[in-house]
Image: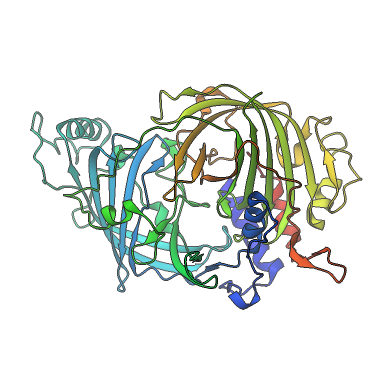
Amino acid sequence: MGLSWCFFIGLLLAYASGKKLWDVPVSQAQQHSTGKLHWEPQCQYQLRHLQDSARISALLPPRLEGHWISTGCEVRPGPEFLTRSYLFYSNRLFKAYQFYYWDPSCHNPSHSLVIKGKLRLRQASWITRGATEADYHLHKVGIVFHSQRAMQEISARISQTSGGDCSGFFPPGRSWAPGVLYEVLSAKEGRDCTTALGFAMHELSLVRVEKHYEPLLQTQPSSSRTVEELYLGDIHTKWSERLHYRPTGYQRPLQSAVHHVHPCPACGIIYRSDEHHPPILPAKAKLPMQLSGRWVSAHCEIRPAVLFLTRYFIFHGTNRTWEGYYYHYSDPLCKQPTFTIYASGHYTKGVPSSIVRGGTELAFKVTCARVTAIDQVTVTMLNSSEPGTCGETGFWSAGMEQDITLTNGCLALGIKLPHTEYELFKMEQDMKDGSLLFIGERPTDGSSPDRPEKRPTSYQAPLIQCAGATGVFSKHISPRYLGKEDNNGNEALKPLPMAFLLSLMAMQFLRWD
């Protein structure tokens, strides 16, 4: 049902926005400067930098030819730990490697998949703004085991869940032979034994390519390095749904083997690997969970069901309380704000996860929340809500913050108070020794992890630490201001394009975290 609504919303978007089939990105000359002001706190700069998006452009239609690789160990729902290496050729053929592991450092390989097929780009997505829809056809899928244990476990799953065509695919009691490639899918022979693996390549049905311009601080201020990222469709958080799910969001992006972030120790290892020689990444020590400080999104985040947002969190470790700002937008570059949610509460002491190695389990209680409507679409929707269900109905106006605690949340935005969520956290260091915070991935169906059994088994895009426990953040930035100043030196409000029908319908299915 969610997908059909998203399709309808996409139709409304095309009608309301009047865009052409391909939504052409804004040139760099039209963007605002993202230079950091000497007085500006790092958190405030990062939030402004995300809104400006001056160094990001989307390639439409996307250019896929080339080699795309993971930049580190990835975690999929389950959990599954893997790295990926995808090659796309000019004749639309592709060859994809997926390397699976026993551990969250991607140091101990289990098995590798080599996937061959053909991909055809179609049109700009009517569901996920900024994405391109694609059709793919698999020719063959092969598997190579890297241990006897992996062979025994997977062969048993295939024998138990597959039909007669797959029974006896691996002879009983056969010992593991290194380097042997077993064909588990063949379009030519009409055989598909991949169901037991939870394998599907629906991620190829949704594509987005972004080009980033990373500043080179050690040279001239105007110098930059190009980084190209390939976003493919997200994987459903529920195992039983992933074989049928058609993506509306993205998973962790791959980066161009030529144009990737530097330094990137994992990139060269993954680039040189194949199904017989899986990448073995250096083992990582688990970092202690030290939440104290301030954390902010590194990029505009895109969620299933057409949600675009950035996040900013403040954790107070002394009394385990937290504050969070959720900035929502109507576009994939987070330049057209719609509303902001502020929430606060407290959290429990973390315990190591028994399901997701390397993760920490916590419970978060949300006790207070406030909402600021930015555009007139949101104002109209909130003023039309049932009295007593979302703040003071009839008194919403653009830029005005309302406390929704006394109405037990906001029904129109899907917020219920008080509210407890069972979370999964992980901390890592990036390639420049900065701190990263991974928070559990939201359920694909838009629900909340409000029960222990719904606790995530994978992660969202990481947040970066912008200030320690003593960091100063004088005031948060209203997302309707993009750094322009009026004649009096005050921040000027930039007019926002509106797709009234799109936003009005989309709000009814909104979930936040």
* Residue at 46% in and 36% down: 238
**Visible residue check, residue 353:** yes
Q: Which of the 4 quarters of the picture holds residue 366? A: top right
Number of marks drawn: 0
Left or right? Give the position of 457 relative to 512. left
* Residue at 44% in and 65% down: 227
* Residue at 86% in and 48% down: 400
Instruction: Check the picture and name the quadrant holding the N terminus.
Output: top right
Location of residue 28 in the rendering, given as x and y in whole percent from the top left corner: 59, 75
In the rendered view, how is the structure colored? Answer: rainbow
> Of residues 269 and 40, which is closer to you in this image?
40
Q: Which of the 4 quarters of the picture holds residue 33? A: bottom right
> Of residues 465 and 356, which is closer to you in this image?
465
Location of residue 482 in the rendering, given as x and y in whole percent from the top left corner: 72, 63
Left or right? Give the position of 403 relative to 135. right
Left or right? Give the position of 501 relative to 225. right
Looking at the image, residue 54 lies above or below residue 155: below
Looking at the image, residue 47 lies above or below residue 27: above
Looking at the image, residue 312 lies above or below residue 167: below
Location of residue 351 in the rendering, given as x and y in whole percent from the top left corner: 49, 21
Left or right? Give the position of 409 relative to 81. right
Q: Which of the 4 quarters of the picture holds residue 111? A: top left
**Visible residue check, residue 512:** no
> Of residues 190 and 46, which is closer to you in this image?
46
Location of residue 138 in the rendering, given as x and y in whole percent from the top left corner: 29, 57
Instruction: Check the picture and name the quadrant holding the C terminus.
Output: top right
